[in-house]
Amino acid sequence: MDSFQKILREAQQKFVAEQEKRFPKDETLKVDLHCHDCNSDEPDELLGRILNVPETWLPSETLIKKLTHNGCDAFIITNHNNARSCYQMQDKGIDVLTAAEFSCRVPDFGIGVHVLAYGFTPEQEVKLEKLRKSIYPFLEYARQHNLPTIWAHPLYHYAANQLPPQAFFDKMMLLFERFEVLNGQRDTWQNTLVREWVEQITPEMIDHYSKKFNINPLNYCIDPYRKFMSGGSDCHMGVFAGTAGVYLHIPNLAEKLKTQPKSQLVLEAIRSGNMAPYGRYEYTEKMTFAMLNFACQIATNYNDPGLVRLLLHKGDTNDKLFSLALSNLLCEVQQNKMAYSFIKIFQNCMMGEKPPFLKKMLVSSAYKPIFKEAENIAKIYERNDENMVKDYYDSILNINNRFYDILRARIDKKMSKAKITERLKNASITELVEKLELPTDIRSYISPQNLGKGKFNLVDFLDGLTLPFFGATLLFVAHFASTKTLFNTRPFLRDFSKRLGKFEHPKRMMWLTDTFGDANGISTFLKEVHTEIKKRNLPIDIVVCSANVQPDDHLIVLKPVKEFSFPAYPDYSFRIPKSVELHNLFASGEYDRVICSTEGIMGLLGLYLKRAYTVEASFYLHTDWLMFARKVLGMERRNLNRVRRILRAFYKAFDKVLVLNSDQKTWLSGTQMNLDPSQVCLTGHWVNERFKPHKPDKQGAFGLDADCRVILYVGRVSNEKGVLELTDIYSEAKKKISKVKLVVVGKGPAVEQLQRENPDAVFIDWVEQSKLPIIYASADILALPSRFDTFALVVLEALSCGLPAVAYNTKGPKDIIKHGECGFLVETPAEMQQTILSFLENGNATQFRQAAIERAKSYNADCIINELLHSVGMG
């Protein structure tokens, strides 16, 4: 089956090939109808307005030169809401058609659109500027004065937290004759949908909607039944100017050029609609390069906008905090001569200027590979072929990887010198949590009195990291910004394609985790999920960050660039992948949603993908970290509240949170966590088919006689699992039952203490899953003294093998065990001791075993997977 992007690429290539054949080549002018330069100085994007930066610093002369280089025969500059560059070039004797891209409002829908207008006079520009607050008088005026207009990138609009309804597009088709169907800054999916929509417009639809909205389309269009398609690069940096546009058909062109300027001929061709769009297949690479160019321009031209302006500007708290952080980062770069010099050289390379020879000779060996790639970028600038975007991006990736390597090596060296790892190991978890509450006084981080003996010196630590850190950050931000720009309207594009009945993006999910290869219950479940995904060939891939896991079908492994353990929980490792590698994997895998199974680094990256690609993100909650903090780490109330607030912010950032028991669902949607109840979905686990009744074999499983009663514990042997309660359980049982043994299967930090307290018990290390069924089948009862388990998979494994279980009446066990039928739910340790003793002495083992098997059948993979797919929008 062809990939979605391949289908789009082929559709685009077919369209462009057909358009190229429409007109005789000797009667066409190649023109980019949509490009910008330095006079696009009022950005539509909020972040640009807060920071007070223009959309580009590109000189008009450089733009004209690049348009010429890329084969354009005539020139148009379409800056935002002004034609200053056109007038300036005309004053210098350059034949440029007057044009601008006006930001207009559609008042009845509260939506902003961009309209390209051509051929107006300075007086008419003033009138258009006044009228653009409402699209209706704006287009009426343009129609009355024979000024041709084009609706630019129709599926990229500006609306206040809403998606435009279908009625908006039904109305717009009455107002416009010309539509930009090939925009060089939009991805091919968006361009293809615009083209398909325009091609589906019929005269009957025009008549129908004219009556419905009581609009006379002749007020806006010369011929409302004819719709024309256009194209333009929408380039702001100059690099790709002229790579998208139109071939304008001008009959008897050679003769007309003798008496008329090209700009006048271009205007007449636009009016008549004699346009054949041209351009290339676009995805994220081109926009990433453009954003990187823009970021370099900002870094080298930035002026502090002022804190008062930033605080009082429109925008929410997140916008302003991000702007403040970015402003500080840009100011830091300008203070660092090496970083500033490199960014300036790199930006020049992106505009075709090779690094100075002396700079290349003096640069340190660590940065020589980066300079080599920058020089390669300068060479690519002179080209205009199908592979230039790919080659640009390959060089960017190579630079990114080199920055990562430099940054990682230097951080490791500085951490070793500052003995940070040792400090973390010696610090209590309470101290670490308290440090999450950062002071608001920036000077407290760098003041001399805070840099004394024995204190962490932030200034010294950052020395030597500015360039690699900013370089890596710059590339990361460019990837995020480009993807966010391209896919900001993804939910709308999805609905729009569904209405068109063509080019619907396939549903495909990325499942993120960094614990797939560990020996714990989460990894056991994920391996079962992987097995079922492969068996059903579901459109889901598990993406693992690991140095040891081997890739497989539907299992993608990213190697960590850094791995470290949490001091208070050494069994769990944090693994950090290359963010750009994951970013690109999401794009190339054509995923349209993400689910995460761990709260750490991969969870944060899942939220990054949600923001960057505007996709739905779900979280699969396996662990009750608040109870872990209280029971295992011994946190007091103040720090518990800090942890709770962090978890609340984290979980609320997801569209769905999947939980494994009803207690968690109640807690998350309650007053403490305040998640919307519709946001929380109940799910469950299932067990492998190997977990089924077996003939008991106590001798083979435990080395015990067949008549010996066995109390079994399976799981991590740690305090949070309540394993120390097993000592009293076993002690009471031995008082009443002559032949009884406690069997503990698993490993963990409490093993040695449990062995000392129960020297006659049987201890079995962590075993392969294939050996567990006979262990369950050969025991008499499973004891789970944990109040920590969100699901208690061991209970379901035991029931599946016919082993009754006793557990506390909380969380997962409460939902699984039917009290008095397949096991028991208790409230206190004393009750657990008495219940186990009573069952071993008097219980109807056969009846309980059969009930356990029947109860386990309720948790089957088919039902749970179908419910899970429905919860994440894939059902």
Image (cartoon, helix red, strand yellow):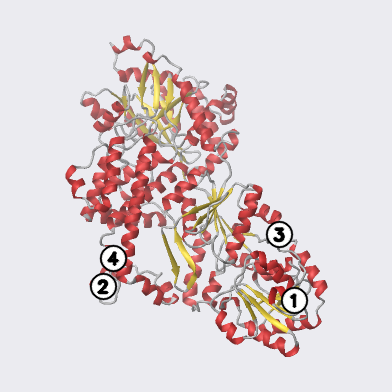
User: How far separated are the C-alphas under marks 1 and 3?
Assistant: 21 Å
User: The residue under label 4 is which amino acid type?
Assistant: Phe
**Classed neighbour count for the residue bearing mark 3: other residues with Cα under 10 Å, few (<14), some (14–19), many (≥20):** few
Label 1 residue SS: loop
- Is residue 610 placed above or below 382 in the rendered structure? below
Label 3 residue SS: loop
Instruction: Mark 1 or mark 3: name the one nearer the start of the chain.
Output: 3
690 sits to left or right of 113: right
Q: Position of residue 514 (x, y in %)?
A: 51, 60
Label 4 residue SS: helix
Q: Position of residue 632 (x, y in %)?
A: 53, 77
Residue that badge 3 annotates: 689
Farthest left residue in view: 358
Instruction: Mark 2 or mark 1: name the one nearer the start of the chain.
Output: 2
Q: Is residue 312 visible in the rendered structure shown here?
A: no
Label 2 residue SS: loop
Depth-wise, is mark 2 or mark 3 nearer the camera? Answer: 3
Residue that badge 2 annotates: 451
User: How far separated are the C-alphas under marks 4 and 2?
Assistant: 11 Å
- Is residue 439 placed above or below 832 in the rendered structure? above
Residue that badge 4 annotates: 461
User: How far separated are the C-alphas under marks 4 and 3?
Assistant: 54 Å
Q: Which mark is residue 780?
A: 1
User: The residue under label 3 is which amino acid type?
Assistant: Glu
Residue at 55% across / 79% down in the picture? 750
